[in-house]
């Protein structure tokens, strides 16, 4: 078996074990393989090993790979920062856009989806650490944004996503995950129109076990499946 297939199987199995240990069902958490900078051949090795969802974070790379049918056999999610002028390349082509953080994006995605005769599932990205450099909406403003989903028939809000600050201290990291979990529960309880909190997307290669313990329903794992990315190429 290839290293990629081996890694994918091991992580899928580990996610089941971690979920059970956290008192959750073994299929409570779905895995998104973060496929950026990996070739269609490498992506197919992962899909062959049981990966059902891929995640791409750049529009050009997504478009190129879609034209090569790189994700054949799996769904693909958009997980990166989405510029307004690129909405048309992503809407209707991804099962889920995980990175919506403004009413403008909601409106543009909705318009595009309606024109295509579809409804686009989205997550709201939360800037859980309040970092200047990161996209996502501040936790305190999430409510106000999500309440507006009712105005946009071409989108359906399915949950929340975050990329917490880089943090060595596991306790601090868990606090971020817990803040997300609480926000997720609070928003679901408000029963906004057009909002169904089903997906809490958090946790990556280094911290998915902590994220699952704190309530993630979806984790996004790249390097633990595909190895280190080489940004100089
Ligand atoms: C690359 C990426 C991941 C996965 O990161 P790893 O540390 O390689 O597991 C998760 N989420 C997003 C948005 C990414 O761009």
Image: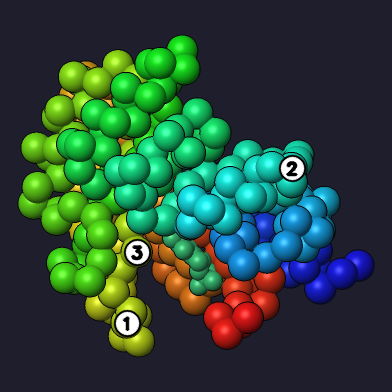
In the picture shown, does residue 220 fall above or below 133? above
State the CA–CA distance, disc 3 to disc 1. Answer: 11 Å
Q: Which residue is mark 1?
A: 167
107 relative position to 156: left or right: left
Q: Nearer the viewer, mark 3 or mark 2?
A: 2
Q: Say the numbered circle drawn on residue 69.
A: 2
Q: Residue furthest top?
A: 117
Q: Residue at x 32, y 22 (%)?
A: 111
In the shown orientation, is residue 142 left or right of residue 171? left
Q: Along the line of sight, which residue is nearer the eye, 182 or 229?
A: 229
Q: Does dot 1 land on a helix, a strand or a loop?
A: loop
Can residue 226 be seen in the rendering of this structure? yes
Number of the front mark, 1 or 2: 2
**Residue 72: x %, y % from top left:** 75, 41
Task: Tell me the quadrant of the picture where the C terminus can be found.
Answer: bottom right
| Residue wearing tag 3 | 163
Quadrant of the rendering where the N terminus is positioned = bottom right
What is the CA distance from the residue labelled 3 to the residue labelled 2? 28 Å
Q: Which residue is more in the foreground, 60 or 159?
A: 60
Residue 47: give x, y in percent of width and height.
76, 51
Name the residue at 60% across, 73% down: 223
């Amino acid at each position: 078996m290839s290293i990629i297939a081996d890694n994918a199987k091991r992580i899928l199995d580990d996610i089941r074990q971690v979920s059970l240990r956290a008192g959750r069902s073994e299929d409570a958490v779905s895995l998104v393989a973060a496929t950026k900078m990996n070739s269609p051949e490498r992506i197919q090795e992962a899909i062959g090993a049981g990966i059902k969802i891929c995640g791409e974070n750049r529009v050009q790379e997504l478009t190129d790979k879609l034209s090569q049918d790189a994700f054949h056999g799996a769904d693909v999610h958009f997980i990166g920062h989405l510029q307004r002028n690129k909405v048309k390349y992503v809407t209707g082509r991804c099962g889920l856009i995980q990175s919506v953080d403004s009413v403008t994006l909601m409106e543009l995605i909705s318009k595009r989806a309606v024109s295509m005769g579809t409804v686009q599932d989205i997550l709201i990205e939360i800037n859980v650490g309040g970092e200047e450099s990161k996209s996502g909406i501040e936790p305190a403003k999430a409510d106000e944004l999500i309440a507006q989903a009712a105005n946009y028939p071409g989108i359906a809000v399915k949950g929340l996503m975050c990329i917490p600050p880089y943090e060595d201290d596991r306790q601090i990291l868990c606090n971020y995950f817990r803040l997300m979990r609480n926000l997720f529960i609070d928003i679901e309880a408000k029963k906004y129109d057009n909002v169904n909190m089903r997906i809490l997307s958090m946790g990556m290669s280094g911290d998915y076990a902590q994220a699952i313990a704190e309530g993630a329903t979806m984790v996004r794992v790249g390097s633990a499946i595909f190895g280190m990315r080489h940004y100089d190429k």
